[in-house]
Image (tube, rainbow, N blue to C red):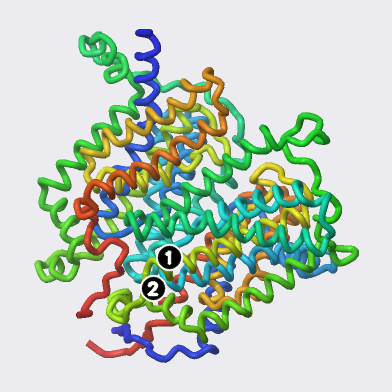
Amino acid sequence: MEEIIISTLQRAMVAGTPLLLATTGEIICERSGILNLGVEGVMALGAVTAFIVTMTTGSPWLGVLAALAAGMVISVIHAFTSVTLQANQVVSGLALTMLGLGLAGMVGKPYVGKPLTIKMEDITIPVLSDIPYIGKALFSQSPFFFMAVGLALVSWFFLQRTRLGIQIRSTGENPKATETQGVNVFLIRYMSVIIGGGFSALAGAHLSISYSKSWIEGMTAGRGWIAIALTIFALWNPGRAIWAAFLFGGIFVAQYLMQPLGISPNFLAMLPYIATLLILVLISLKDPRKLNAPAMLAAPYKRGER
Amino acid sequence: MIRLSYTDRYQITRLRTLVTNIFSLAAGLVVISIIFLIAGVNPLFAISEIFQGSFGSMYGFKETITKAIPLILIGAGLTLAFRAKFWNIGAEGQMLMGAIFSTWTGLTFGDALPGFAIIPLMFAAGFLGGALWGIIPAILKIRYAINEVISTLMLNYICAHILTMLIVGPWRGATRFGFPGTDNLPDAAILSVIPGSRIHYITLILALACAAILTLAIYKTRFGYEARVVGENPDAGKYAGINFFKTTLILMAVSGGLAGLAGVGEVAGIHHYLGYPASVSSGYGFTAIIVAWLAKLNPLYTVISGIFFAGILVGGDAIQISLGLPAATVEIVNGTLLIFLIMGDYFLHNKITVSFSRT
């Protein structure tokens, strides 16, 4: 029994890691007022980039950096259409997803099904990892896990306590007033979209070089979309995103735990998606006003307009 | 010094829209060419292969029309939802639900009823399936303030798994020798095709009729007006006493229902049985989003844009074989064209003047 609890917890953490990375990125982006539905595509592109670079150079960290760069570069497209051209952000994000998935499929075709032999060593924190039950799950994990939790905490601090973070948030609430304070709203939004894209790509890198150590088309399996839902679930707060993501990681793992009980695997595979909807309903039932979405989310901002 | 100034363009003529669209698509093709070039493929050859494959031969053209059927149906339905700013990304799931409902109807009553009775019944069942799957996100949005992009997407995944669960489980046909999939539909439940092609013309006629009726509904009826107000000016709508819940429910029932009809066509016209989700729909629900956008949310124009994007799907298949490109190529083409179409919108709505001045 003890072993089951430990392995379940550990696997929930692993499954939650990419969700946390992508959710944190999307939170930063949406806080600035830009809705980015391109997460799924950017994640796939990050996954394929990390995989190819790791395989050819032998260094997983170069792979991570390359994924980060790829995610940031492709997100410029969404920043350009939604900030500069004030285009419809829903459609632009969808286009980014299509493009990302397409590019990932094209670039990654020769690599489909090839196993990655290079391993990323787990980081084990001495003493803490010896705590019964939770020690191994929380303190002996892949570097991505620590990166995800660390980035979420840093992002929380950044958004709540730093000057730039507050500028990002006020841009999402009231770009006009923010601009009269001498803040470059366009620059802030560009930056937030690009950072968000980088985080999504890191989530992809985790999938391909740490989680499954292979690349296959469609491996992101809707995680990017779940991250967008988790952004709402976390009420645009990276701190809340931490437990939201790992709760969802747990739901992903529950699929495998319940399989021996004779429940249809297809039914179990539905769980994360059903849970997403149920949780959104629960939040709304509790108090819809507490949603506290950025006031100007997805509203294009035009300079000099009243 | 060169100065650019931007002013709003208030009058947008049809000609300007057309020219802007053509320029956007052309600019998109240039970027796609660059991507092809990087991938080591001669872009001129690849692009001419795409259009040769889809419009260049009788066989290709017939395939293009076949694939245009679901795109027109779904795309027309999406124009209605998008006009009300209801971002229905769930047409894929609504289409599959239509396929599930109609397969059940066909398998259950197909032996007992003649063709002229069973086929309308199957279309009705398909519409119902798609409509039911479409109104779930409408209820979630109006009653629980849940973002429809998320809910429609989650429902896509849920529906795909329901379908798979059915075909590997209770619905698995005895004639499939253990492979997933239902038995073939009875002969009476199968749509006839134009000889020498796969064009199931009943669905084609239905698609054209739906596009025409929907155009009339949007521009000439009270409901169409209300749907537009819900999207463009919700505050004014509230003062005018528009029932948001009812309007959203109806428009999503129609949008989902049309996607459901597309599902009927694919099952009863092409495959003749219910197989894996990926075989029922090759992403029509997503491609139709671009179809609706290129049609500038006018259902009638989805006939043209539907045929155009069906051509890209067919041509994409052709270059996969002749140039060895992966299936994802079509997604690159679609994504890039969509990005350029929304970029074009900017130039449609803003007048940019370049002036030279000495400083």
Q: Which mark is residue B203?
A: none
Q: Residue visible at 48% across and 22% down? A: A258
Image mark 1: chain:
B
Q: Which mark is residue B86?
A: 1
Q: Is residue B141 left or right of residue B125?
A: left
* Mark 2: few/some/many CA within 10 Å (<14, 14-19, 20+): some
Q: Could you say which is closer to the camera, residue A243 or residue B214?
A: B214
Quadrant containing the C terminus of chain A in the rendered view: bottom left
Residue B60 seen in the figure: no
Q: Is residue B6 left or right of residue B228?
A: left
Tag 1 secondary structure:
loop
Height in image: B248 above or below A19?
Answer: below
Asked if the residue under mark 2 is in contact with the one under mark 1, i.e. CB atoms within 8 Å, the reply is yes
Q: Residue visible at 23% across and 41% down? A: A238
Height in image: B153 above or below B60?
Answer: above
Point out residue B160 in the picture as x, y percentages from the top left corner: 58, 44
Residue A221 seen in the figure: yes
Residue type at the position of mark 2: Gly
Q: Could you say which is closer to the camera, residue A291 or residue B61?
A: A291
Separation of residues labelled 1 and 2 (CA atoms): 8 Å
Residue type at the position of mark 1: Phe
Image mark 2: chain:
B
Q: Residue visible at 40% across and 34% down? A: A62
The residue where tag 2 is placed is B231
Tag 2 secondary structure:
helix
Q: Could you say which is closer to the camera, residue A237 or residue B315?
A: A237
**Mark positioned earlier in the residue sequence (1 or 2):** 1
Q: Is residue B3 left or right of residue B125?
A: left
Q: Is residue B179 left or right of residue B187?
A: left
